[in-house]
Amino acid sequence: MSENQLTPKLFGCSQSMVLAEKIAKEYGVPLGKVKTTHFSDGEFQPAFEESVRGRRVFIIGSTFPTADNLMEMLLMLDAAKRASARHITAVMPYFGWARQDRKDQPRVAIGAKLVANIIQAAGATRIMTMDLHADQIQGFFEKPVDHLFASTIFMSYINDLKLDNLTIASPDMGGSKRAYAYSKYLMSDVVICYKQRKKANVIGHMELIGDVKGKNVILVDDMIDTGGTLTRAADLMMERGALSVRAICTHPILSGDAYEKIQNSKLTELIVSDTIPLKKQISKIKVVTCAPLFADVMNKVQHNTSISDQFLM
């Protein structure tokens, strides 16, 4: 096999084109060309404008709503399969529909499992993602899953802050494992927020487990949607005597009035990755790119070398 045949092809879905271009630049190859035909009723058809026969193909696209983003990934996976690509990796920095990882009430779907099934059926031979909402989603796939941790890109940012009396916090009980992992690496204390929801995205009550008085607190979470949990947690911690409260969230979904909540909250800043493009820029949001991490892991996958050095926790 020639060196040219060994070179992988990288393609980006439209919703993640900016990130795909960054990853391709970090990898050192040009981003592949895709032409998308749109029909008047909203249907669309992506087509590769270059051969992928016998190549390893990386298709980069986060699958956050609308469902068109997931559909575009599926169509591109199927197109690569039918064009005789050798290996097809679905690179989904943000794996959408992941909050539906179990039956938490009667007569509901397990959406994450459904999405895993159709991604594999479409042609993915490998999946690459970051900070899944629930670790067990890896088990929904029968193909290899590279589950990366955003801690590898956020840790240097935290160290550069040089904060005294640092305390790591989880905004809910479910994120305690992530918070303890950060605290172990940073050798800091941990506090946990206990919340009760009235319904999805609506908090009924929140209480703090641990002491934040005189501490610089960093909340860590995998995603931020409406911003209600984080901003309420920040306000509660400042009321309890915290010196400052920052938040690190991998996936900035930021729906509804989230931007206004963050800007008007007592958060010093919100640090996010670029798995999902921001709808607008505000002064309190800092973006740290995940492109070097994905490019490095993709390169190691291409050359069949270990990626274990990318896991800080």
Image: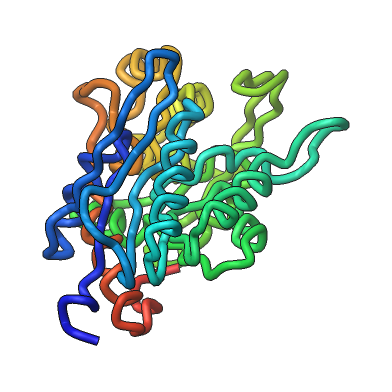
| Spot occupied by residue 73 in the image (x, y as percentages of width and height) | 43, 44
Q: Is residue 243 above or below residue 187?
A: above
What residue do we see at 36% from left, 45% from top?
61
Instruction: Work out whether residue 93 or residue 189 is closer to the camera in this orientation and state it.
Output: 93
What residue do we see at 29% from left, 35% from top?
14
| Spot occupied by residue 34 in the image (x, y as percentages of width and height) | 24, 43
Instruction: Work out whether residue 255 or residue 187 is closer to the camera in this orientation and state it.
Output: 255
What residue do we see at 69% from left, 24% from top?
197
| Spot occupied by residue 37 in the image (x, y as percentages of width and height) | 31, 29
Which quadrant would residue 63 be assigned to in this image? Answer: top left
Query: Could you tell whether 299 is left or right of 100 in the image?
Result: left
**Quarter that holds the N terminus:** bottom left
**Quarter that holds the C terminus:** bottom left
| Spot occupied by residue 104 in the image (x, y as percentages of width and height) | 79, 37
Query: Could you tell whether 23 is left or right of 118 in the image?
Result: left
Query: Could you tell whether 273 is left or right of 258 in the image?
Result: left
Q: How is the image coloured?
A: rainbow
| Residue 203 can be seen, yes or no | yes
Q: Is residue 29 above or below residue 12?
A: below
Instruction: Work out whether residue 75 or residue 250 is closer to the camera in this orientation and state it.
Output: 75
Q: Is residue 17 above or below residue 154?
A: above
| Residue 217 can be seen, yes or no | no
What residue do we see at 32% from left, 34% from top?
15
Which quadrant would residue 219 be assigned to in this image? Answer: top left
Tag count in the figure?
A: 0
Instruction: Work out whether residue 295 or residue 164 is closer to the camera in this orientation and state it.
Output: 295
